[in-house]
Structure formats: C-alpha cells, structure tokens
Image (cartoon, helix red, strand yellow):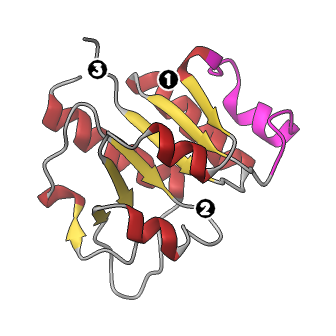
Amino acid sequence: MSYKPKIALYEPDIPQNTAAIIRTCACLGAKLEIIEPCGFLLSDKRFKRVVMDYMDWDKIDIYQSSEHFFEAKKNQRIVLLTTKASISYTKFNFDKNDTILFGRESAGVPESVHQSVNNRLKIPMNASTRSLNIASSVAIVLAESLRQTELI
C-alpha cells in the first residue's frame, strides 16, 4: 500500500493561502483535500498567481460538504490543528495514514467538528499572539508528520 500524507482544508476562504498550501503539498508529496464551500473560486486570479504550475487535480480531492468529508473518513484518523487544543503537535505520534485538518482562516471549524475529532493539536506560540498564517501552519505540521513517519 502506498502512503501519502493528507492535508484537509475546512472551507478555506483566502485564495492565496490555499494556493500556497497546494504548492507545499506538491513539493512535499502530500494529498490535499478541500472541504467546500470555499470562500473563492478556483479560477480566482489571486489563486492562480500563487499556485502557478503546481496545480495537479490528481492530488486534490474536493468534498462537497463536511458531511461528505466525515463520511468518507469514518474509518480513518483525523487530526485537527486548532488554537483551542492543549496538546502540542510535537508531542503527538503521527501515523502514515492520518488526515491533518485545518480550519477556515477567518473562523476555524465549528464546535461540531471539534466534537467529532478525537485528536486536537496546536502549534505553541507566544502568549501575546493569536495565530499563525494557515500556509505556515500546514508547512510546520506536515514537515513534522513526514519526519515522524519517515515519508521524506
């Protein structure tokens, strides 16, 4: 069986961030999963400017809703990255088949998603800061997952 890390974006709303995440996934060999609705069109010129030629539809799955996403993942482990978690991503043991879920830039994920995911992690930050850019967060956590699972 071929393993590939999976990054899932819950209703992303900033095209440049999603495009940067597509580039990161392409460069590090991860599959990207987008849970709709998106706050932009994939034809958005801001999106196209950042994604350049890294867009590979074979490595991107689109889910029409969170219900479709969670139904497809019902027998798989989902790891949610959230500022509301108490466990650092560096203290977590990633598995080769994990799906690492990131919330909307503007609002994170709803409480119902928090409740449906058993593994919630955070990236430790200075107390005076609110959050990292999602593209930076994906790169940080994806790199650690790949390191732990020796997929790179």
Q: Is residue 107 above or below residue 69?
A: below
Percent coordinates x, y for residue 131 in the rendering: 47, 72
18 horizontally vs 148: left or right: right
Viewer-nearest of discs 1 and 3? 3
- Which quadrant of the figure has residue 106? bottom right
Specify the farthest residue to the top: 1
The answer to whether residue 15 is above or below residue 127 is above
Q: Amino acid at mark 1?
A: Ala
Q: Which residues are magenta?
A: 40-57
- Dots 3, 2 in contact, CB < 8 A: no
Label 1 – label 3 distance at C-alpha: 15 Å
Mark 3: few, some, or many residues within 10 Å (few <14, many ≥20)? few
Three-letter amino acid code at disc 3?
Tyr
SS at badge 3? loop
Label ID, residue 26: 1
In the figure, residue 91 lies in which quadrant? bottom left
Please check the rendered image and state whether residue 42 is part of the magenta-colored stretch, yes or no: yes
Q: Quadrant of residue 22?
A: top right
- Dot 3 corresponds to which residue? 3
